[in-house]
Image: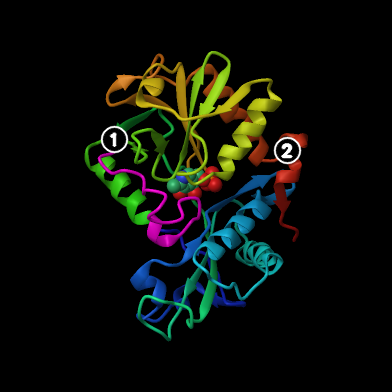
Amino acid sequence: MVDATEWIWMDGKFVKWADAKIHILTHTLHYGTGVFEGIRFYKTSKGPAVFRLKEHIARLFYSASAVQMSMPFTEKQISDAVCELLRKNKVTCGYIRPIAYFGYGVMGLNPKDSVVNCSIICWPWGAYLSSEPLRVRLSPYMRMHPKTTVPDAKICGNYVNSTFASVEAKNKGYHEALLLDHKGNIAEGPGENIFLVKGNKLYTPTKGNILPGITRDSIITIAKDEGMDVVEKTLTIKDLEHADEAFFTGTAAEVVGIGTFEDKPIGNGSFGPITTKLRTIYLDAVNGRIKKYEPWLTHIKK
Ligand SMILES: Cc1ncc(COP(=O)(O)O)c(C=O)c1O
């Protein structure tokens, strides 16, 4: 169960958690045309801070444009509402879920004349994936073909694909799934991007059929700052099998090493040194312990 906080922001107003309800004919509930974000905030020595708020809100607006949704608030209004919500709920670390959706009023596939509603919810949320090396399975589900949707937008309906892959892997006793794209190349996890390590180089699939993660971008920056080469290219299962290390990145998952793929160890099957190093720097950055990454944090003032 989600750990309830006191307030939820709905269309410009704060309402009590238990009163944050919507109509059964909400358009997005039927057709999946909403858009959302997943953001983490962390406890720092200067109080709670949101990690890369600007980039997450920019992606929310990009996703809205992908479903031709005209947002009734500006990026600044949504960002300010996130900060105000954290202040009001007095939570120090956790997860933030802004969502924009076509609301109640019209039915039928075209939401053109529908009202657009926005909400922001926050709650304390610990580790999303196991902190032991992940046992990953090849998903029988393919990452959506880029011509079936807009794959680099965070559209509610896109997550049917992710949910299927995640549930299937977990039902089979694995921590997580890996999805291939329509060409049989590595795409990503259901809610994570993937990196391979070979020597002192990092490899990650190119954009186009993945959700280009904000954690992915942070790890690319950190790795380059650490003097590593980062290569965005088409990757195959063979590349994964022959990698020294592999890890997933995502806001919820953070940075977590892949121990085995299809029951075969990647490298020595535990968190490799580069995964450990990048994970440590990432966690230090999000928790406000590295000065040069301070600009990634939005501190919540009392
Ligand atoms: C399908 C998918 N890929 C990758 C990611 C990682 O993105 P981010 O690092 O922005 O959380 C997510 C999480 O939002 C996701 O849902």
Residue located beneath label 2 in the image: 293
What's drawn in magenta, residue-wise? 138-158
**Residue 57, percent from left and from top:** 62, 58
Instruction: Determine the CA span between mark 1 and mark 2.
Output: 34 Å
Q: Is residue 149 above or below residue 170?
A: below
**Residue 113, percent from left and from top:** 48, 83
Give the mark count.
2
**Residue 240 occupies which quadrant of the picture?**
top left
Q: What residue type is labelled 2?
A: Tyr
Q: For the N terminus, give its image quadrant.
A: bottom left
Q: In this view, does 82 lie above or below 210?
A: below
Label 1 crowd bin: few (<14), some (14–19), many (20+), radius 10 Å: some
Look at 62% across and 77% down and name the residue there.
12
Q: Is residue 139 visible?
A: yes
Of residues 248 and 112, the one nearer the viewer is 112
The disc placed on residue 174 is: 1
Q: Is residue 1 visible?
A: no
Q: Which amino acid does label 1 sit on?
A: Tyr
Q: Is the magenta stretch mostly helix, strand or loop?
A: loop
Q: Does the magenta stretch include residue 13?
A: no
Of residues 34 and 79, the one nearer the viewer is 34
**Residue 80, percent from left and from top:** 70, 65
Label 2 crowd bin: few (<14), some (14–19), many (20+), radius 10 Å: some
Look at 53% across and 24% down and name the residue there.
275
**Residue 103, percent from left and from top:** 45, 79
